[in-house]
Image (cartoon, grey):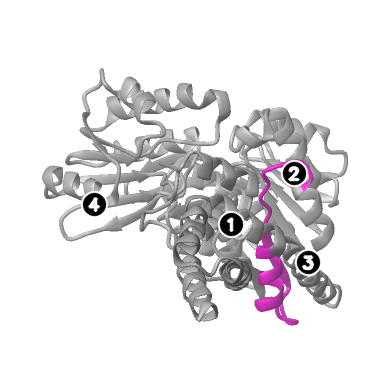
Amino acid sequence: MFVLVAVVVSVCFALLDLIYIKLFQLENYRVKNYINKVLKFDFAFGKKNKLNFTKRVNRLIFIDFLIKLTIFLLFFGVFPVFWKGLIVVIAFLIVSGELMCLTFFVAHPLEELIKKLYIRKAKNKLKNMKCKKIAITGSFGKTSTKNILHQIMKEEFDVCVSPKSYNTPMGVCRTVLESLKETDDFLILEFGARRKGDIEFLAEFVGVDFGVITPIGNCHLETFGSVENIENTKYELCQHTDCVVFNGKSASSRKLFERYPKRKYLVCVENSFAYASDIYVGKDGSRFVMTLDDKQFFCKTKLLGKANIDNIVVGAAMAYLLGENLFNIQKAIEKLEPTPHRLELIKGEKSFVIDDSYNSNFDGFKEALEILNEFNGKKIVVSPGIVELGKEQFKVNMQAGQLVGQTADVFVIMNKTNKEALYQGAKDGRAKIFFADTRQEQLDVLKKVIGQGDVVLFENDFPDNIK
């Protein structure tokens, strides 16, 4: 009888533990971050980010069930009396969040082994491929630059590109193993990093032929500690390739350009290898003249914002260096499709939406507001601000709030993390301020304020683990 009870109780706890596994997944499987959240009783109950039942999560669920079953079989065998068993269950319920760490530690060696085997398999496949590998890193614009380069290059070549924002070792492995074909001429990847050594590991693993450095700023300052540390980590890509294109729109990327001793190209600044001039940016797209290797040609695109023009210049410069002709580059620029959730304009029956929900930096926030200002009708901004800025976070969000207050008619401040900073910045502006902690509250506010011809800017978004 106690065996059946142990199984039932273990199943119930396994279902309860899905809450903890979701939080663990949202914290990128970092136990320290998970423990901090649990100790603060800060759980991710929202519906914004559902638990993704990956193979790793399924293994965690199975291991968790086995551990719980073993523990309860032992306890119920030792304490067969009902009330004593009930005390055990209640005790486990109280510490269930902390107890999940046991599951994570038991699973860790297996996950590390699977990770190593997965990487080895991808390495072996890459060794047998003749394609050239291009890696893109930086603080801002990696995914947009990657997608633009891909759209330009596919005019003439077979190109494999990592999907969405896949920029981790496992994301790179998945791209190589699932998408890369023997007939592909190029493999385009983006490299992300949260700490020193991340880019170096990816660069050595892939064997990069060409590199791109996008603008560098204070993204992930909380984990890196300083902009200098961010610069050095991004430079790890430069140390593992012989040709790099640098977007010179940030002081840090220009510094790395000066530091790099090999074949290099500075772009996006006047009189450099490639840059844009005579720029027009509007609500329907952009027009500009591109100078590329001293050759000039007119470009137009449906993409919004000056940052996207810079991304186009970077993509065009790299495509040109890889053998794409200018006619195809010009034609591809006109056909470019926006990267989802990055200054993506959505036209509805009643209003416009500018979806910039994947943006997470101040410069991008500022530019999105400039684009918003081009529209007629009521201007509405929905944003939770910017995170992972360390000691600078309150100051930066206060500045962002001030800009919103000066530009928008309505400002819906989401979540609690930057609520005070955004409010302090925006309170003296012209925007009417609302607060929302959930998507339903957000929707209720928008239903009240939105009208025909209005435009809503969704600027950044938080996962459930950030309140």
Q: Nearer the viewer, mark 3 or mark 4?
A: 4
Q: Is 311 placed left or right of 253 in the picture? A: left
Q: Residue at x 64, y 61 (%)?
A: 103
Q: Upstream in the sequence, badge 3 or badge 2?
A: 3
Question: Helix or strand or loop: what does disc 2 sit on?
Answer: strand
**Placement of 419 over or under 452, stated as above or below:** above
The quadrant holding residue 108 is bottom right
Instruction: Report if residue 261 lies within the magenta region.
Output: no
Instruction: Tell me the SS state at disc 1.
Output: helix
Q: CA distance from mark 3 to mark 4?
A: 47 Å
- Residue occupied by mark 2: 265
The kind of residue on which mark 3 rests is Lys
Around disc 2, counting alpha carbons within 10 Å, would you say few (fewer than 14), some (14 to 19), or many (20 or more)? many
Q: Amino acid at mark 4?
A: Gln
- Residue 389 image-quadrant placement: top right
> Mark 3 against mark 2, which lies toward the viewer?
3
Which numbered disc flags the more N-terminal residue, 3 or 4? 3
Q: Amino acid at mark 1?
A: Met
**As rendered, which of 345 and 330 lies closer to the eye?**
345
Callout 1: 10 Å neighbours few (<14), some, many (20+)? many
Q: Which residues are magenta?
A: 170-197
- Which residue is located at x 28 percent, y 29 percent? 407
Q: Are marks 3 and 4 in contact (CB under 8 Å)?
A: no
In the image, residue 443 sits, relative to residue 400, either above or below, namely below
